[in-house]
Amino acid sequence: MTSYKTHLKETIKLAVPVSVGQLGHVMLGATDSIMVGHVGAVPLAASSLVNGIVFLIIVFGLGMTLAITPLVSIARGREDKDQCGVILRQSLLLNSVITILLLGILLIVADMILYMNQEEAVALQAISYAKIIAFSIIPFMIFQVYRQFIEGLAFTKPAMYITLAAVLVNVFGNWVFIYGNLGLPAYGLDGAGYSTLITRSFMAATILTYVLKAQQYKQYEPSFKFRNINWPVLRELLRIGVPTGFQHFFEVGAFSFSAIMIGWLGSTQLAAHQIALSLASASFMVILGISAAGTIRVGHTYGRKNIQDVRKAGFLTTLFAASVMAFSGIIFILFRDKLPLIFTTDPDVIKTAATLIIVAALFQISDGAQAAGLGILRGITDVRIPMIITFIAYWIIALPIGYLLGFTFKMEVVGIWIGLLAGLTTAAIMLNLRFEIKTRNLGLN
């Protein structure tokens, strides 16, 4: 049996690179916004509109690739190297089909932007930009498949290095294509789309080259060479991937709809919401790393059929995540009046944002615990009930309570955020209770 100290050490070792990589993804979006913002308000608005729509769609594909990590980790725990390779090759097959479907949906949605009651100038730029971004889903999904595969094998640093390098590639690409440098015309917002496409292609090509060339992966035959269609593995990938995709969709969708409701209250409250959410999202990137590490650690011990280590790894992940977020919450409370100054000098926005930051501080622990809960349950391939829990937490509890408090009880944006707090807390309790019950009855020994 592995000690708690060893579990914590291994969890941190796996989590840090994933967290840094997630922050790298945030930097990719931030550099786009900053550099597009210098072109004008219209392209920035179009960029914000498209990125919100695209993320709601692409998050499902992300969920599909997350099925790879626990299955590979479990196979690694069983020391079944052949199965690790089978999972990768079948994932490439399945996610190729998913990618084509998502690409088609994105192209259709791009043409529908004109009918979304947006300003004409914003809509026209958004359509062109969306169609370019749509094609970047192809390299994005290739990168994700190989990333989840090697992370399932407990190699989390390569994807981190590639993502950080991609930030530099994206900044250079934006400089060339947005502003028109090195003899090229200034493409404006479309230039940011071209840069994203090139950057994601760089990420896919780099991780593909690395995995195919590195000696430690050759035993898994990590190529595109299919021997046959393995229906049991495909079914397992779908069984885990589809609910995981919906888990992400329910959470992202709830926060997106909250932003729509807050928009009804006015620009000041919406701006305060964006500030508080940006701060909460930054700390959440760290938790995504811990959650991913929990999936890997739990999956590995699950494959070794050691129930005590499964429970140790799982509960330690949740405790670690909650502790990190508690520290984050303390920082939020102590600097609630200073943090909004990073984003604005508007006194009304600062005052409202400071209040929201207190609510954000309160739901930090819940947010960390629910993300960890999803990760450790994924490690034992339990995803269907967690999907239902996330739907109930966000769409049956968070949004209705937020609407009731925000509009009926006139608490406005603070009421909507209290609704989110209620949903996150419900998810945290139910997901970790599910892990306790599920692992107690696993009977692996």
Image (cartoon, helix red, strand yellow):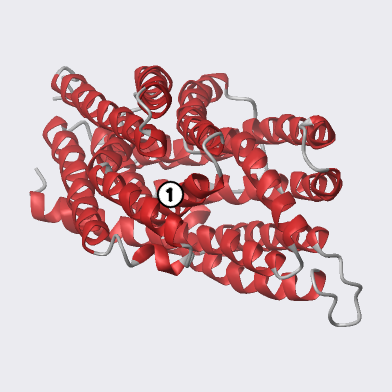
Q: Kindly identify the residue that appears in the image at 45 percent across and 47 percent down.
A: 273
Q: Kindly identify the residue that appears in the image at 57 percent across and 19 percent down.
A: 231
Vertical placement of residue 189 versus 169, above or below = above
Q: In the visual, does 328 lie left or right of 403?
A: left
Q: Secondary structure at mark 1?
A: helix
Pick the residue in front: 393 or 293.
393
* Residue 294 placement (x, y as % from top left): 28, 44
Q: Kindly identify the residue that appears in the image at 64 percent across and 62 percent down.
A: 33
On-image quarter of the C terminus = top left
Q: How many marks?
A: 1
Pick the residue in front: 92 or 432.
432
Q: Residue placed farthest to the bottom in the image?
A: 182
Vertical placement of residue 382 versus 159, above or below = above
Q: Which residue is mark 1?
A: 277
Q: In the visual, does 283 lie left or right of 440?
A: right
* Residue 68 placement (x, y as % from top left): 48, 37
| Mark 1 crowdedness (10 Å alpha carbons): few <14, some 14-19, many ≥20 | some
Q: Kindly identify the residue that appears in the image at 70 percent across and 52 percent down.
A: 45
**In terms of image quadrants, where is residue 394?**
top left
Amino acid at the residue labelled 1 = Leu
* Residue 234 placement (x, y as % from top left): 55, 24
Q: In the visual, does 248 lie left or right of 353?
A: right
Pick the residue in front: 112 or 75.
112
On-image quarter of the N terminus = top left
* Residue 195 placement (x, y as % from top left): 74, 64
Q: Is residue 24 shown to the viewer in this render?
A: yes
Q: In the visual, does 426 lie left or right of 122?
A: left
**In terms of image quadrants, where is residue 347?**
bottom left
**In terms of image quadrants, where is residue 190?**
bottom right
Q: Is residue 216 shown to the viewer in this render?
A: no
